[in-house]
Amino acid sequence: MALVEIDHLTIGFDGHAAVSDLSLRIARGDRFGIIGESGSGKSLTALSIAGLLPEAAQVSGRIAFDGTPLPDNERAMARLRGKRIGMVFQEPMTALNPLMTIGEQIEEAINLAGISEVMPLALPDLLDEVGLAPGHVGRFPHQLSGGQRQRAMIAIALASQPELMIADEPTSALDAITQRTVLDLIAEICKRRHMTLLFISHDIRAVAALCDRVGVMRAGELVEQGETGDVFRAPQADYTRKLLAASRMQRRDRPAAAARVDGAPLLRVESVNRVYRHGGLWPWRDAPVRAVDGVTLNIVAGECVALVGPSGCGKTTLARMIVGLDDVSAGQLVFDGAAYRGRNLPPLLRAGLSLVFQDPFSSFDPRMTIGDSLGEPLHLLGRLSRDEHDARLAEAIEAVGLSVTMLERYPHEFSGGQRQRLAIARALVTRPRLVVLDEPVSALDVSVRGDVLNLLSRLQEEHGLTYLIISHDLDMVAAMADRVLVMEKGKIVEEGAPQSLFAAPQHSLTKALMAARLPEIAA
Amino acid sequence: MNWQLLGRHPSLVVGLLAAVLFALLGLVSLWWTPFPIEQISIARRFLGPVAEHWLGTDHLGRDILSLVMRGTLTSFVVAGLGVIIGIGVGVPLGLAAVAWGGIVEWLVLRLSDITFAFPAVIVAILIAALFGPGEINAVIAIGIFNIPVFARVARGGALAIATQDYVAAARLAGLGNAAIAARHLLPNIMSLLIVQGTIQLSLGILAEAGLSYIGLGTQPPATSLGLMLRDAQSLFLIHPWLSVVPGLTIVLIVIALNIAGDGLRDAIDPRLRHEGLNHGAG
């Protein structure tokens, strides 16, 4: 008998079905993965098993746990959750209580599980099992790294010796190296405890690496399910094929002449430092943080350079200084022959440089039309006539494959992929020469990533753009970049063409990044 | 905001309707009251509610309904002007604190700390001591009291907006601090300001009543609800009705505004609107 049985589950909000007629079985000991993009209803499905759906949800269908239907009674449901189901959420910072130490929170979970007689033994064992040191017990969530927080979350989920663990995008907020270690940890724990796992992710490769059965969800429906190997080897649904294709990134073909590496550098970064002081009343107590530490690099016109590194390595700080959002502490930047220190970048030079943000949902003012937002950078060019202004907007929005009529609309009317196209259009409206792309596709659904990357390639060829891509996604970098710079703790530690660099990494960080790469799905 | 939204928040409808009703009652008194409020008629004093005087007459024989109508107007005008001063000075200060940061922010915060340290009554006493009592002084005192409130609300809201990427995008587009504050920060904190404005309006009405009651606000022959209370207090044991009418009016207006404020916050604050759905996003 299956541990979790879901029959004809439908979840609706205000009459709109978010999940419709979903049936699935998760056998005891299975590792079941649900793959889906945002809005596919995969998280709602997981929450419904734990009885945690929002009050406004209208639910029909049957969910049974270990043969008995889920209790209607909230107390009984809470007991079931506390003892038999463990949950791990996406963002460990918000799932943990910031005012309690990690140890207290794990102990609380152990106490609630009602196995307090074994308590003195349990806490050290649990810490050991998830790879936390005993010293971490007294720390607060903000004193731990993202990976350590997620380990603490897993310890809390494991405290009650659950039969089922539900992990909802547990690694999406983590960088590549941490993601791999957390995935390995989950796999190892499941194996050791013979625990059933429901793993929810948009990352098809994470699911392939971890799960033995998968379900693919799209717009509230389960379009396909089966053994991992079968589904990926011979996908039945078109959507699965599309997702699989999107997860394999082809290196784009660029004419070798496109990158004239011998040309004069468009951007020079000359031994740039950025030091943060934590302020405070006693400045000498806090050692200053060197976010960027003596970075020197050149970018030649027409090149596509990628800057990779784990989170917190200073790559975003460097990008912010290059585009003029932050000042360097020492050193200088030279763009197109003119030196600047960051925010003192003069308007006409500013027009030659632009930035595409990571999160397309926060990069447009919700109260301004797309046209107003897109037109904003045109201030840099001085006064333009009305016709010229409109012509520039039309040129930019058509360049990214959208229509001029969309200029009248507001950001909430667009999907994530469309917004990122609009963000690219905004970056192009001043006809810049260098575009800095900060994780341009990491916030997007897998199926639209390919489109956006193709768009970027096409624009580069058409407009002769130079790209600086900031990312931790090695596959994307391998597909796009002519040259890769690896950054660690504010320093550039390795540099080279992607093929040679990834084939024979020299520095330990590059090796770690390569090792953390999830295996390609066999075709 | 649309009508559908109103339907989903009955408390907002009730509160707004009641508040608008009182405001209209006050407005009407500009052109018409049942009796002129200055009309004294000692012979007809202390009448209870009768057909001619719906709410009776006071110790000078003035019609209480007329006085309440005009008093409500005074309350709304004084409190409303106080809110306008608060928004007009406080919001730019709060936005400037966020847009410029550094020393500007420090100055704004310390300034609001200092202002917070003096309650409206102390400010009013100071102003009355300098310029004499009167409505204008009550407006200034309440306005000064409102400035740091709005400065803090504007700064708090704008701080959250300022971390958004679109503000960074605007900086990249070469917009200065003032332009960013006006184009991006202000429109996005409007809902917060409207809600706070409603709450400050009700606090202002209370403050005006308090100031008039201690004799620092409205002066006779003009009238306000606080002044009516002051006139009635010595007669409270003999003619409690005279205090009950203005007192109850103040209570009703303040309750109406508070309900409307709470309703507005529920209706237009997206954080509250989406509560309970944030886990279902995937």
Image (spheres, coloured by chain):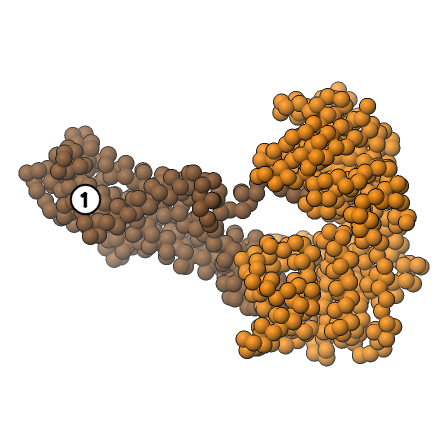
Task: Name the residue located 65 percent from the left edge and 35 percent from the top edge.
Answer: A11
Given the image, on which type of amino acid does mark 1 rest? Ser
Task: Name the residue located 23 percent from the left edge and 36 percent from the top edge.
Answer: B245
Residue A206 seen from this side: no
The residue identified by callout 1 is B66
Using residue B110 as the reference point, say whether residue B279 is left or right of it: right
B183 above or below B65?
below
The picture places residue A89, in percent across and down from the top left corner, at 71, 39
In this orientation, which residue lies closer to the viewer: A255 or A341?
Answer: A255
The picture places residue A369, in percent across and down from the top left corner, at 56, 61
Chain A: colour as depicted:
orange
Q: Chain of mark 1?
A: B
| Chain represented in brown | B
In this orientation, which residue lies closer to the viewer: A206 or A470?
Answer: A206
The picture places residue A466, in percent across and down from the top left corner, at 76, 71
Task: Name the residue located 18 percent from the left edge and 44 percent from the top edge.
Answer: B66
